[in-house]
Every structure is written in structure tokens, then in C-alpha cells.
Image: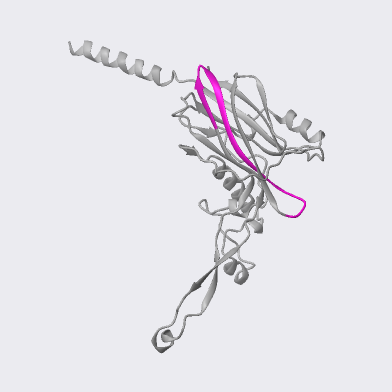
Amino acid sequence: MHGVKRQLAFIFALAWASNAHAVRWFEVEIIAFEQKSSPLLREDFSLEHKPIEGKKQRNLLTEGFNSQGQQLCLQGDSFFDPRPLSVKLTHKNASWLCEDNADYLSKFDTLPLTPYAPSQEHMDNIYLLAKEQLQFDSTLTKLKRKGLKPLLHTGWRFPEQSKRRAPFIKIFAGKRFKEPVSYRISEAITQQGYVSLLPAVPTAQPNVSQDSWQIEGLIKIHVRHYLYVTTELDIRYDIDNGDTQTARMSQYTRVYSGDVHYLDHPKLGIIFQIRKYKH
């Protein structure tokens, strides 16, 4: 009797394992490139948009760009020295440590085309593709020959998930747009005693705001019989008077695995392909 129970338990374990691996996996490869400006373009992108939002966001690119910054630090590039400025000035000739938890992303004025990722072959969790696993090198060459500027070339592997369960992948690329520094007036008294009885002197304190990237937004891929891609991206660009404007690419597309697809916008083009992975 105990032998039968053990056999049944073994069969159930095998069935559970087979169901766990029954989830189909895919990989997506993406190239985002800057469109050429055209004097014939008459569209108005000055409208303000609500911030892009999405539940279950995954940030895969930050780790990849940080890894590249760390590699540059290890190669002796002083621009990626993670030490505070005061330490750099007082210890110019001293060596430095390129720690894993340093914020190398903040050092980039323009992000690399492809975030670093190690080569992996598994179906445990969503992960970035390594550079050698990408297949659009010839497409990149063609874009450059046409005078178009690629801003991002990356990809990731992901499991089949419903629209409700699939995460949004955070996308950012291109050059940094520094936010102008604004100031707030505050009345701060920093001394004690009789001096504190004097009227407070207003002081200007800077409001710290986060810089933006040329492309920022979210992409989600979910499966419901077909593959569906939700794209919400902001594209920042300079205009003639020196100001910055933002255009929004917002698309919802049904696609087929294996086909190369193109998303078009006057300011941004995206070429992507979703491929089956191990099925």
C-alpha cells in the first residue's frame, strides 16, 4: 500500500513539473531609433500628457546600464569614479573601488545603445538578452546607412502571461535632459540664543528634481490567443527656441511571433520581433 502511495506521489510530482514547464516562453528584440526631422511636419506635440503609469513595472535596464558603468570604472575611466567630489579633489592620485552598489547610471549623459547582460538560458524569471543573443545587427547597419540614429537595442525573455498578470517593462534610452533647477524660499533660523529673536532671513533652497531621458516609458507584452504589445513612450526633443517638448507614442498592437514589426511615429521608430523560446 505504501509503495502505491509513493508511486502516486511520484506521478503527481511529474505532472506538476510538466505543467510548470508547460508555460510558453518568448523573447523580444527591440530597436528604437530617432526619426529625421522634417520641415514638412505639421503635427503639434505641445499638448501636455498625463504621466505614463502602469501596474507591475519591471526595471531591467537600470541593472544593465549600471553594469556597463562599473565596467568603465574598472577600466580606469575616472568619469565613472563613484567617490564623492570632495574625496576626488583631495585624493586625486589615489585608486578607487568600483563597488557593485554604486550608482553608475547617474554618470551617463548619453546611455549606451545596448545595456549589458550576461548570457543566460533558463525559464526561471524575466531577464535581459545578452548582446551576442541579439539578431538585429544587420538592421542596425541599414538604419545607420540611412542616416537614422539608433537609441536603444535590447531584448528580454518572458513567460506567456495574461493582460492582468503581465508586467510593464520600463524603457529609457538616449541622452539625458537635465531638469532646470528651481528654488523655494524658506525662513530658516539656524542659531540659538538671543540671535533667534531676530527676524528670520529668507533663504533660497533648490528643489531637487529628477532628470529625464530622451525616451522614457513602458512596454507590456501579453498573450490571449495572440500576442499583444502595449507601448506608451515619451520622446523628448529640443525645439528652435531652446525649449524642450515631449511627444507621446501610444499604441496597442496585435502581432505574430517570428514576424518583424514596425511602430511609426514622426519622432521615433521602433522595430521589434517576438520569437518563440524553446517551444
Magenta stretch in the rendered image? 220-242
The percent position of residue 197, horizontal first and vertical second, equals: 41, 86
Q: Residue at x 74, y 32 (%)?
A: 140
The answer to whether residue 278 is seen in the rendering is: no
The percent position of residue 84, horizontal first and vertical second, equals: 56, 64
Viewer-proximal residue, 18 or 163? 163
> Could you say which quadrant of the image residue 247 lies in?
top right
Viewer-proximal residue, 37 or 262? 37
Whether residue 225 sits left or right of residue 251 in the image: it is left
Whether residue 159 sits left or right of residue 72 in the image: it is left
Report if residue 233 lies within the magenta region.
yes
The percent position of residue 49, horizontal first and vertical second, equals: 59, 43
Report if residue 190 lies within the magenta region.
no
Quadrant of image for the N terminus: top left
Magenta segment, principal secondary structure?
Answer: strand
Q: Residue at x 55, y 21 (%)?
A: 227
Q: Residue at x 69, y 29 (%)?
A: 136
Whether residue 64 sits left or right of residue 15 in the image: it is right
Q: Is residue 181 above or below residue 243?
A: below
Q: Is residue 248 above or below residue 257?
A: below
Q: Residue furthest left?
A: 1
The percent position of residue 202, horizontal first and vertical second, equals: 52, 76
